[in-house]
Amino acid sequence: MKLGDSIISFIGLSLCAGAWVLGSKIPKDSINHVGADFFPSGVILLLTFAFLVNFIQIIRSKNSKQSKQTTGKGGRFCCLLLLCLFYPLGLKWLGFILATGILTFIMLYLANMRNISTVLLGAVATPVIVHSLFCRFFDIELPLGVLQRMLH
Amino acid sequence: MDTGIFLSQFSVSLFLNLLPIIFLGVFCGIFFCLTAKLKAESVATFVLPFTINLPLAAAVGLVLAVYGGGRYAELLLRAGSAHFDLLDTVDRDVLNLSWQDTSGKIFFIGQVASLFGFTISLIVLFYGIPLFAQWNIELEAADLFAVLVCILCVAIVVSGKPVGKGLISALFGLLFCTIGSDPISTYSRWTYGVERLFDGVPLLLLLLGILVLSDVLTKVERFALFEKTKHISRAFIPKWVQIKMTLLPMIKGSIIGLVVSAIPAASRAAAFISYYDTKRSEQHKQNYLVCAAASQSAQASSGVGAMFSLLLFGIPGTQLGVIIFMTFLLHGLQPSSFFGQPNIESISSILGGAFITGIVLLGLGFCGMHFFAACSRLDGRILLPIIFVVTISGAYLMHKSIFDVYLTILFGIIGYIRNRYKYPLMPFLLAFILGPIIEVNLRHTLAFSEGDFSILLTNPLALILLITATLLLLMTFLKQWSFTRNIKGNM
């Protein structure tokens, strides 16, 4: 928890630095209204200050047993983050049905469902049902990706 | 404005039209929250993209029904678990009871107290809004800026998390709302040529990501930690003496809820204040039923009471308020501008939806208690990826844009990290919604003084409010600091 919080604060401070650099590249004469340059810059400055305060608070606090229990395992957290990052890419290249099938499989496995036949059934049924529901009720064609190319 | 206007809007035909939708909403809310263990706010947000084609009254009714069902499910889950905690984290030991004897009774009293607080607030809302709407308060730009900053600070303090984290959440919200066109000069900021961002970050995508996706991801990670709900005891109706004992705390809790919720964004504190107030009295120190009644009635009454700030000033004081605010935006309506005339259509839709939801919850809640308790033992893990995928498809459905999917997932990741590291949500949402008004008013004030910030110090009301806001933050920070030091000293 303490390490994770410190990492978050560090990333936050880096983001603030990046935002500051990007904000300073905006030509001043492009905004000719009083206080226009203050609002984003002031917010970034305050955010940097808040991250520093938080960082100090984290350093001063101690790890408690309860926080360790509720946070869970780091591996699962990283897997879910990666899954979220890759899902839109999969949606674009593989299409809705394949990407959703893979996502469902991994998600159910990460949720401690160890019965492979149930997980597989869920991975097949979920994308097919959701796709047909959206096509029928909302008249929305979700991207089919590879499957569409194969069908053509 | 007259209360008769609301009554004329609320006819028998509307009641009959809304009843099936609300019944379905309540049922879905209870089912999803019980099986997938999602929060009531997440399920209420989940239905938002599908309310676009519904009339406003039905859309608001559906959202309220799903939320009401979700709250009922949360109460049922807590009452049926071995470690019953009414107030989430505070004072777990007090209500650490043996579920066989008490779970049913606590659930019954909790449900009655919720309905009691809810009804009292609804009546006050019904007669209070026309009264308050007649006030014509005109604030200067500097005052309005100070009022909004003060509200943000209240949200940070009330969130119950470290002030540093609350500040980060609020400032992140303010930073996100600067994405898009500059509200005065229309110069585009942080958009990098992405057309979809010129009007700012869409609130619906933000809510879908930060409330629904994040909750699904959190539940995937922690599903194994959930206890299965035990059978609710058959003898769930308390004795008349016990019910009589809870009446006064219920009334007191409802009043506390209403008074606290008058301060925008402070309603979260109502249940805690009412609970500790009841616990402090010698008479009820060990009486868990009375404590449960007091806190539940305060929570319910503050939830409805928070609608005051939404309908009168356009400030959503709770997460439910934010979701209803979004429902209005989806239907092209603004609940109210700050101290402007409230929108009658929006008020009657909320009152109608809340009224019917209350009736349906009363019937379905008590009749189906044992059925729902059995439902909670179903394995709802399969629902989590389905909800994840339907949410993303719902985000795609709005503009058929893959960019919306990216944005929703980005907010989902932010929300997941927020959940995991316990950054408060309300300051973020409130800052995101109020950010543009804060910015415009600050810049108008600075335009008067040609960029001189001392104008904020020469205006008495603005000065008092800004000092109050600073003191609130500082005092809470110092209190938390000394608390940490005491813990370290005792270790």
Image (cartoon, helix red, strand yellow):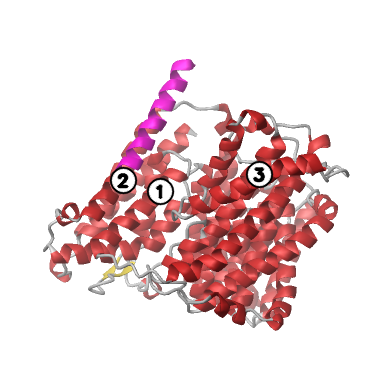
Q: Is residue A77 magenta?
A: no
Which circle, 3 or 2, is nearer the viewer?
A: 3
Q: Which residues are magenta?
A: B468-491
Q: Chain of mark 1?
A: B
Which mark, residue B154?
1
| Sequence-first disc among 3 and 2 | 3
Q: Quadrant of residue A67?
A: top right
**Does residue B370 appear anywhere in the picture?**
yes
Residue A41 in percent (x, y) is at: 23, 55
Task: Look at the numbered discs 2 and 1 and tell me whether their residues touch, using CB distance below 8 Å.
Answer: no
Local SS, label 2: helix
Residue B397 in percent (x, y) is at: 57, 75
Local SS, label 1: helix
| Sequence-first disc among 1 and 3 | 1
Q: Is residue B486 magenta?
A: yes
| Within-10-Å neighbours for mark 1: few <14, some 14–19, many 20+ | many
